Every structure is written in C-alpha cells, then in structure tokens.
Image (cartoon, rainbow, N blue to C red):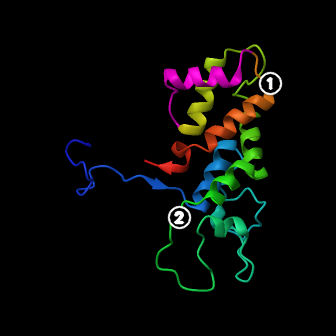
Amino acid sequence: SIGVDPDNRLLSRFPLQRHSFETQRDALLAVSGNLDLKTGGPPAGSDSRRRTLYGFVNRMDVPPEMTTFDFPSPSTSCPQRSATTVAPQALYLMNNEFVMQCASAMLQGANFGITPGNDISEKVQIVFQRVLGRSPAENDIRNARSFLGTDPSRERWEHYVHALLLTNEFGFTD
C-alpha cells in the first residue's frame, strides 16, 4: 500500500508504466474487438489485425509512427528503449485514422447497444468497462452526460470513446 511504502522502494505495488507503441496498438485493437490472437506465422503488414509483435519492420524504412513512439532502430543493438513524452505522440493518437476506426468499431459490437433512446448512464457503464476496465464514477457519468447531451448521435459517441482512448488511464498500466 502507499502508506507502507510511499517511495515504492520495496515494490509493494506495481509501478505506473506507459504502454509502448506495440502494446498501445494491441490494446486499441483489443478494445475495438478486432485483435487477431492467432500465434505464429509470417510477418503481417501494418494494416493487419494481428498483434504488433508479428508486424513486418523494414530496417531501411521504419514507419514514422513507430519512431514517434520510441521504437528503436532495428539495424542496431538496443539494450533498453528510451521513453519520451512528446507532442507528436498525442497528435498521432488524436488525429490518426486507425485510432478513430478503433473507437468506431468498438461501438459496432452487438452488446453495446449504442442506439438512440437508451439510457446514457447504462451505455457509459458499458463503454467504461470495455475501455478502462472499471465502472465510471459519478463525476465520469456527469461529464459524459455533459459531453453527449440528451440524445447523442453515433458520431458523438465515437468522439466520446475516442477521447477515452486518449486518456492516461488507457495509455498507462497501473
């Protein structure tokens, strides 16, 4: 607990860690319901639904989104990956079509029921469980109602889910 080991020197709790590019992409695919969990096989392209671990990396042409998220050069040895927090990382997540597609795909699942007329609190509960793995607090529901309005469109829901995918709570493991 925090009172017993406030500096976490005894590792009484897991230290907060940010997702790497690979785990962030896999988490986005998992939340959207599109993650292909098949193991083994040949390398997959960047547009694949397979885990990022199976992605093909051209040593001479590393995709810019990978280098934005501190992917090490595959042509040299890298004993430890650097971890930076820079504006292009946030801009990538805010403006990338892949992230927006994941938000949209999550709402297409049959059990989400994001349709006009349903109770907003109930839908926010479903979205929170899927994206953040917890129930929303009262202020989360209040903020959702404020953002979504009384009869939100599908596009408004997509923007809401997209915003949750950009939170630190989704991007970090605690």
Nearer-the-camera pick, 39 or 82: 82
Residue at figure coordinates x 51%, y 66% from the top left:
83
Q: Nearer the viewer, mark 1 or mark 2?
A: 2
| 11 relative to 166 in the view: left or right | left
Say if 77 sits above or below 119 in the image: below
**Segment colored magenta:** 133-150
- Identify the residue position indicated by label 2 in the image: 84
Q: Give the mark nearer the N terminus: 1 vs 2.
A: 2
Task: Identify the residue shown where x is 26% and y is 50%.
Answer: 12
Q: Secondary structure at mark 1?
A: loop
* Label 2 packing within 10 angstroms: few (<14), some (14-19), many (20+): few
* Residue type at numbered disc 1: Ser
> Does the image show residue 109?
no
- Specify whether 109 is left or right of 146: right
Query: In the image, what residue type sits under mark 2?
Result: Thr
Whether residue 90 is visible here, answered yes or no, is yes
Q: Marks 1 and 2, how far apart in space?
A: 36 Å
Residue at which label 1 appears: 153
Q: Residue at x 61, y 18 (%)?
A: 121
Nearest the viewer among 154 and 29 is 154
Q: Is residue 9 magenta?
A: no
Q: State the predominant SS element of the stretch in magenta.
A: helix
From this view, report whether residue 161 is shown above or below residue 30.
above
Q: Residue furthest left?
A: 4
Total tally of numbered discs in the picture:
2
Q: Are marks 1 and 2 in contact (CB under 8 Å)?
A: no
SS of the residue under disc 2? loop
Residue 134 position within the rendered picture, expressed as x and y whole percent measured from the top left: 50, 32
